[in-house]
Image (tube, rainbow, N blue to C red):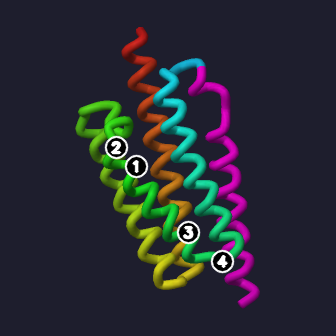
Amino acid sequence: MKGNIGRVAAVLCIGLFFVGRGQTDEPKRNAPNQSVAFMRLKLDHSQKVLEGLAMEDFELVAKHARLIALLTEDENWKLFQTVEYRHFSAEFQRLANELTKEAQKKNLDGTALAYVQMTMSCVNCHKYVRGVRMARAD
């Protein structure tokens, strides 16, 4: 029991780190207002997932994980038509669905792991997108 609590606490700290890092002013300088609003929506849902994890509120986690997965179908999601971007997008959607599934099972460790994996997928994709945008600017 004590080991599980430590692991979950570590996962939540990592999640807070990544959610907090996503709240910079950089998108405001580099993207149209619509993209910024869409990113804000993704961050809001991610914060609700993290809140649900911290409170062991699996219904809150599942609800916002489903909403995150739905965002991947929005037109604003499809920034590029590259093979790499489609791979990142499919992986993110798979992990959002996994997060929903683990939350529905009320599996705290599985839910926390799916959240971290989804967050890492998000970070990796954003790194890719920044690289593509910089290459296009050159």
In this view, 94 is above or below 138: below
Mark 2, secondary structure of its residue: loop
Q: What distance separates the C-alpha of mark 1 from that of mark 2? A: 5 Å
Disc 1 marks a residue whose amino acid type is Leu
Closest to the observer, 97 or 9 = 97
Instruction: Estimate the spatial distance between the alpha carbons at disc 3 and disc 4, rounded to whole Å.
Output: 9 Å
Disc count in the image? 4
Residue under pointer 4: 56
The span from disc 3 to disc 2 (Cα, nearest Å) is 20 Å
- Residue bearing the label numbered 2: 74
Q: Earlier in the sequence, mark 4 or mark 1?
A: 4
Residue, disc 1: 71
Q: Amino acid at mark 2?
A: Asp
Q: Which mark is residue 114?
A: none
Query: Where does label 3 land, which residue?
Result: 61
Judged left or right of residue 76, residue 52 is: right
Q: Earlier in the sequence, mark 1 or mark 3?
A: 3
Q: x, y (%) of residue 125?
A: 43, 41
- Residue 5 within the magenta-colored segment of the rendering: yes
- Give yes or no for contact between labels 2 and 4 (Cβ–Cβ under 8 Å): no
Instruction: State the SS at label 3.
Output: helix
Residue at 45% across / 58% down in the picture?
67
90 in the magenta segment = no
Vertical relation: 91 (above or below) 38: below
Q: Which residues are magenta?
A: 1-28
Check disc 1: other Cα within 10 Å, few if <14, some if 14-19, many if 20+.
Answer: some
Q: Residue at x 55, y 69 (%)?
A: 61
Q: Amino acid at mark 4?
A: Glu
